[in-house]
Every structure is written in C-alpha cells, then in structure tokens.
Amino acid sequence: MKSKADFPGYAARLREKAEAVLRKHVAQSPPEDQNALVYEEFLHEQHKHRIELELENMELSAALSIDDVRRPLYELRMHQVELELQNEDLRTAHDELEVVKARYFDLFDLAPVGYCMFDDKGLIQEANLTVAKMLDVTRGNLNKKPISRFIHKEDQDIFYLKNKQLQAIGEPLECELRLLKRSGTFFWARLEGALAKTDGASVCRIVISDITERKNAELEVARVNEQLQLSLAEKDKFFSIIAHDLRGPMTGFIGMSSLLKDNVTHYTASQLRKIAVIMKESAEKMFYLLENLLEWSKLNRGMIKLEPDVFGLEDVVLRSMELLRAVADQKKMALNCTVPSGLKVFADQHMLDIVLRNLLSNALKFSNSGSSVSIQATRDEEMVVIAVQDNGVGMDPGTTAKLFSMDKNTSRIGTKGELGSGIGLILCKEFVEMHGGRIWVESTPGQGSIFKFSLPIKR
C-alpha cells in the first residue's frame, strides 16, 4: 500500500501547505485587550495550529530523503559564507572610502587656492577654509551669503557680466577683480569658474587665486615705465638745450670775437667796449646755462646731497641780487629786498643760491625796462615763504601749469630777446622739494608774476 509520500507532487503540495500555515501563524498575534475567556480560546487555537504544523512537518520529513535535506542545508551554509565574505569586503571598502573622504576634505580645505560654489542666484552654497581666510571671515558666515557682498563696488559690473554669460551660454567665468575683506581692505583675485549640476540644480564652481603680488608687480612695472618715459623726456630736453639754447650765446660770442679778429684796428674804444659787453653777456649766459645743466645732471645721478644749516636769509638774497645787478642796470630796473632782518632758514645755502638766482634771472628777463623786481619773505611757526615778484608780461593759466614739468616745452623769449632753457625752474622745484617745501606761481597776463617757495625755519 502506497503512503502519501509516494504520490507525485505530494512533497511540493505539503511544502506549500506548511508555508501557508506558517504565514498564517506569523501574521497572527494576540490581541491586547481580549478578556480572559477569549484569550483562552486564542491560546487553544494557537496550540492546535502548532500540533497541525508539527504533524505536517513529520509528514514532510517522511516525504523527503536525506539528500533532499542536505542539499539545501549545504547551499544555505554556502550562501552564509558568501554573505560573510561580501560583508567583509563591504566593511573594507567602507573604511577605504572614509580614508579617501577625509583626504579629500583635507585637500579641499587646505588647498592653496580658494574653492567656492554658488547657485544661480549668486548665493554661496559651499566654500573651503582658504576662501574664509582670504576674506577674513568664518566659513559659517559665508553660507547662503551673496557672493557680490565680497566684491569691490567698482568691480561688481565685471562680475555681473561674466556671471550672466556663464548662466546664459555656459561660457567659462574668467575675470580679475578686487575682493573685500571683513576689515574693508581688498586684495586682487582671479576667478575661474564653470557650471555644474548638484542634486539636479545648476551651480557655479569657482577657483579663487590671490594675485595681489602679481598686480603689485604690474603696477611697479607701470611706475618704472613712467619713470623711464620721464627720463627719456628729460634726456630729450637736455639735448634740446645743448643743441639750441647753448648754441645761441655761443654763436653770439664767436661772432663778436670774429669781428674783433678781423677789424680790431678799425674800431674806436667805444665800439670795442660795446663788443666786450656783448661778449661778456654771452659768456655769462653760457656760464649760467652750463652751471644749471651741471647741477641738473648731478641731481639726476644722485650726486647732490642735501646739507642744510641755519643761516640768515637776508644776506643770501642780497648776494644773489648783487650778482644780477649788471643785468638789471642794462634794463634800467630796480631790485628791491624787503626780507626782514634776522629772519633765518634751515636750508642748503648752495641750493638756495641757485633757486634765487634762477627766479631773479627769470623776473628780469620777462620784465619791461624801467620796472622793478622785489623779493619778500614771510614766516609762520614752521615755514618761511619767499616771493620773487615782477611787473612783467605775466602768463596765462595754460603756461603756468606747464612751468615745472620737464616734458613740456616752456622756453620763452624775454622782453629784450633773451633766450631761456626752462631747466632753471625744474632745478628750483627739485631743490625746494628736497627741503620739504613747495614752489608755485601766481601770474596774470600783462600784470606780472609772483614765484613763491617755502623753506623750513628749523631742523
């Protein structure tokens, strides 16, 4: 007689039935608020189900061979071992990932350049420690702040245009601008950025490099180039003076000496005296011009040192006037000194002589015959202001603005045809500024000019 286990498909049906009973058993749980009688019935049902399950299991065991049981057990053990190995690999990979993650954050935060990410509204989403240090703020104070807050006001249009192009057509953001620190000072930075997608949103990732040193170097190069241009202008001026202004008196001197050589026996004593005066004037002009050129050359080569001392101003002014007395007499001009007796200055006497001589010479040159030139001086607690005043032809504002600039041609003809180089006023400006003073001019066309300069009273 065949048992139930011998029927085809019996084991499968039995397994299905057991699984159904087991699912039903797992799904049921004792209610919490049953009264005692209901609870006893529930326990009775549970006990009944367990007995049925055990009977079914016994029948299932009888239906399965030993090999049928061993194979699934072996497979289960194999799966368990495989899962344990996979778990070990996952733990190792997780540890390695944590190491790489920590290394990435170290590189991100401690990078020599700043990394920053902002959204399409310009709000900062993330920034590394380098950015925070550059801006002198904590990283928390950067989060959700507009990046425009840290851009110099004059450079915000540059950033706005570049960011607009980036958002519109994806053109990489590249610009150089000034970023503001918390203190209100700024530094030059280069921004390089591109669009990226983060959690489905479009953001801009930028690299910030501090280029302050490079910008300062560029400014220094520009300053040096400007100095070179000025030096070239001074060189051109120097050659112009030699080629033109020095040639004038030299030509006159040579012409007079040639007349003397060829006709000395034919001239009367009065004619010879006039020729001698002309030759003397030419020689003096050449001497003063050469002296100015020499002083200017020494000044530009750093060979002149300021050696100030305390001395009386009146004596120096009177001595300079006496040197130019002959020139004043030829134009029938009066020289007046109203410098207070006993007024002292702290200055380099040699430089002051050159300044006074040049200003007096110019005043005589551009004054009409029969007029006068005066030198006055006033003082306050720290400085003495010396003024050389004439009643000559005067100057318009355009001319006065160019007087002390080497690269501007300000040479003019005097009232008696006297030539000038313009280098004398450049020397005056340099010497006065070496003392810590300044020089300026007040002039009206047709009414004359007043050249003023200041010198310290004491050390």
Image: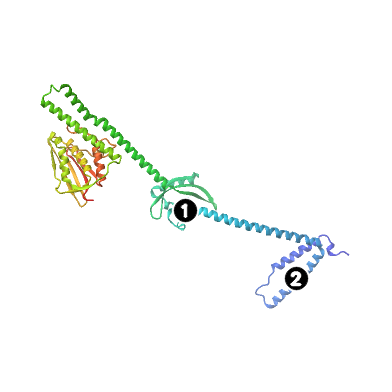
Instruction: Mark 2 or mark 1: name the one nearer the start of the chain.
Output: 2
Q: Position of residue 339 (x, y in %)?
A: 15, 46
Q: Which quadrant is home to the N terminus?
A: bottom right
For image coordinates 79% across by 69% down, the residue present is: 55
Q: CB under 8 Å between callouts 2 and 1? A: no
Residue 291: image x %, image y %?
23, 36
Residue 262: percent from left, percent from top = 17, 21
Q: Is residue 150 above or below residue 375?
A: below
**Residue at horizontal 21 percent and vertical 40 percent from the top:** 354
- 424 vs 104, left or right, is left
Task: Look at label 2 and name its amino acid.
Answer: Arg
Q: Farthest residue to the right: give it.
A: 1
Mark-to-mark CA distance, 2 and 1? 69 Å
Quadrant in which residue 420 is drawn? top left
Image quadrant in which you'd find residue 306: top left
Front disc: 2 or 1: 1
Which mark is drawn over residue 348?
none
Q: Amino acid at mark 1?
A: Thr
Of helix, strand and loop, which one carries label 1?
A: helix
**Residue closest to the eye, 11 or 281:** 281
Q: Secondary structure at mark 2?
A: helix
- Residue 408 seen by the camera: yes
Q: Which residue is mark 2?
A: 50
How many numbered circles does the render carry?
2
In the rendering, which numbered label is found on residue 130? 1
Q: Is residue 123 visible?
A: no
